[in-house]
Image (tube, rainbow, N blue to C red):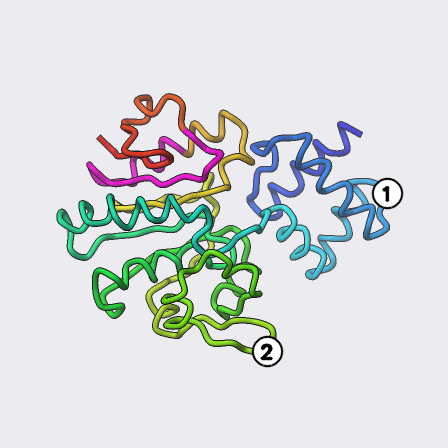
Amino acid sequence: MAQDYEQFIANIKKKTGIDLSLYKEAQMKRRLTSLYEKRGYRSFQDYFIAISQDRKLLEEFLDRMTINVSEFYRNGKRWEVLEKKLLPKILERNSRPKIWSAACSTGEEPYTLAMIMSKFMPLSQVQILATDLDENVIARAKVGLYPERSLNEVPDDMKRKYFTKDGSFFKIADEIKRTVTFKKQNLLADPFGGPYDLIVCRNVLIYFTEDAKDILYKKFSAALRPDGIFFVGSTEQIFNPGLYDFETEDTFFYRKK
């Protein structure tokens, strides 16, 4: 069984460029085993053969692997800190800040950033890069249609201004959509570009091993300009920020030295 999974990891890396060995093994193995059993396969080997031949199965595998749980203004108090305390400082340094939402899933995060930025400048001046590994979720983000539960934390004024009801869903306004450029990206393998004034990467790093996190923190740090802000999820505190040239600016916010 262990060998079967190792071979699967090697095959997937060749086929997609994704290195599953950088994810926590027990978690990933459990998730993928239940997926292939549900589809009627008996081993990782059988499953790999199937996903090599069936585009839909491959897409489902990628979707499952990239854990998409997202909502607007998730952990609202943190977004408040960004809006009230940190963005004014960022805008003092750069009136057209360079912003990146990494591992953006179905788009709630970059669109939240755009709504917050709309309080500081015309939306026509807001530019946000949003990246994810999964083309499926990027396609869904571009459509901009969300179930009601995704909007639980959205302030009422923002909900009225930027969402319209569409059947049992809510559609986000085109003027918000236009502020975000979506791109496919593998965080571990691809270059980051920059320098950014703000990088948001939340509720993704928990799925990586400590070694992979170390690589990513270094890459994020290198992609920020001095005094740039790195915003992580509420289970992703960096315990030794100094190692990456970060200083703690607030809970779950780190400033590049």
Q: Secondary structure at mark 1?
A: loop
Mark 2 or mark 1, whichever is nearer to me: 2
Q: Position of residue 65 (x, y in %)?
A: 63, 46
220 relative to 47 in the view: left or right: left
Q: Position of residue 124 (x, y in %)?
A: 25, 70
Most distant residue in the front direction: 156
- Compare residues 166 and 154 and report the one nearer the observer: 154
- Residue drawn at (45%, 43%) of the image: 202
Q: Quadrant of the N terminus?
A: top right
Q: As shown in the figure, which amino acid type bears the numbered disc 2?
A: Gly
Name the element at disc 2.
loop
Amino acid type of the residue that numbered disc 1 sits on in the rendered structure: Arg
Q: Is residue 163 magenta?
A: no
Q: In the figure, is residue 239 to the left or right of 124? A: right
Residue 42 shows which numbered tag?
Answer: 1
Q: Residue at x 46, y 59 (%)?
A: 107
Asked where in the image residue 157 lies, by quadrant, the reply is bottom left
Give the total of numbered labels: 2
Is 197 rendered above or below residue 21? below
Give the residues in magenta: 217-237
Q: Which residue is depicted at the point 45% across and 40% down?
A: 233
Q: Residue at x 55, y 44 (%)?
A: 17
- Mark 2, other Cα within 10 Å: few <14 / some 14–19 / many ≥20: few
Q: Would you name the residue on which mark 2 appears?
A: 167
- Measured as percent of width and height from the top left, residue 90 is found at 20, 47
Which numbered circle lies on residue 235?
Answer: none
Image location (x, y in percent) of residue 234: 46, 37
